Image (spheres, helix red, strand yellow):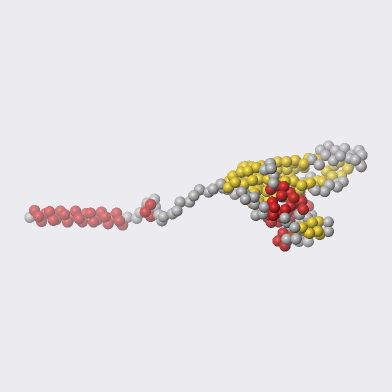
Amino acid sequence: MKNKKLLIIIAAVVVVVAVVLAVVLLQPKKDNDPGTQPPVDPTPPPTEVTYKLGMGAVAGSHTASQTNLTVATVVLDAQGKIVACRLDVAQNKYKIEDEEVVFTVLNSKMELKEGYNMKPASGIGKEWYEQAKAFEEFVVGKTAAEVEALTVVQNGTHWVSNDPVLSAGCTMDIVDFKAAVVKACNDEQGMSFETDKTFTLGLGINSANDSSSAEDEENYLVKMNVEFSASVVIDGKVVATVNDAYQP
């Protein structure tokens, strides 16, 4: 009799254990249970890359009514290759009025946009700023030596690129573009910075007219100040900048 009761107790315990196990096994696992997550290789944190910001300027031809200054800024990677480039030109025009030198144009060519009005004379139907941007894009990935080695051919009074890719977007004289970019790449006053984020490269030019006397129209002195600055911006903050000024 005792053996029979013992067998009944053991059987009851086995049933209870079986029911408990069934409930546990059939219950869905929670999302935070590591057993439900597929194995994932840990992703290393992004590595910061070192870049250099540089700027260069080339004074072009001056006449009795205008001065020209081509400015370039570049960002180089650790291998010395251009990853970003910006170009602009301060082409300041002036005239003599009541024995004073009066500036008539102080905006840069990039600032003028369509106001520069080169498109009607362009063989490819592009404005100055559009062609300058084509040159900016073309030099990305190149070193200073490769930019300097770009060949040009004479077209009237201009020296233009004979590269079919570049000439498809830029038919302007590129001599000063080349020289300014090379100077920017070799800028000894350039500034290094590190980042693992996307950045924006900006270039600004500001021209101001100083007081100028023109009492003697043959020997008057034009006083002008051109200040220019390049900056790298990340998340709305300046992380690198270089400045310079030109006083013809």
Q: Quick check: 20 left or right of 166?
A: left
Disc tally is 0
Q: Quadrant of the N terminus?
A: bottom left
The residue lying at 45 percent from left, 51 percent from top is: 42
Q: Quadrant of the C terminus?
A: top right
Instruction: Answer with the quarter of the image where residue 101 lies.
Output: top right
59 or 110: nearer the viewer: 59
Residue extending furthest bottom?
Answer: 164
124 or 148: nearer the viewer: 148
- Can see residue 70? yes
- Can see residue 203? no
Tell me: residue 16, above or below residue 235.
below
Q: Position of residue 232 (x, y in %)?
A: 64, 45
Instruction: Answer with the quarter of the image where residue 152 lies.
Output: bottom right
Q: Quick check: 72 left or right of 8?
A: right
Q: Position of residue 166 (x, y in %)?
A: 72, 59
241 or 159: nearer the viewer: 159
The residue lying at 78 percent from left, 55 percent from top is: 173
Q: Position of residue 169 (x, y in %)?
A: 72, 59
Q: Quick check: 40 left or right of 147?
A: left
Residue extending furthest left?
Answer: 1
The residue lying at 73 percent from left, 43 percent from top is: 228
Q: Position of residue 55 (x, y in %)?
A: 70, 45
Q: Quick check: 174 left or right of 238?
A: right
The residue lying at 65 percent from left, 48 percent from top is: 75
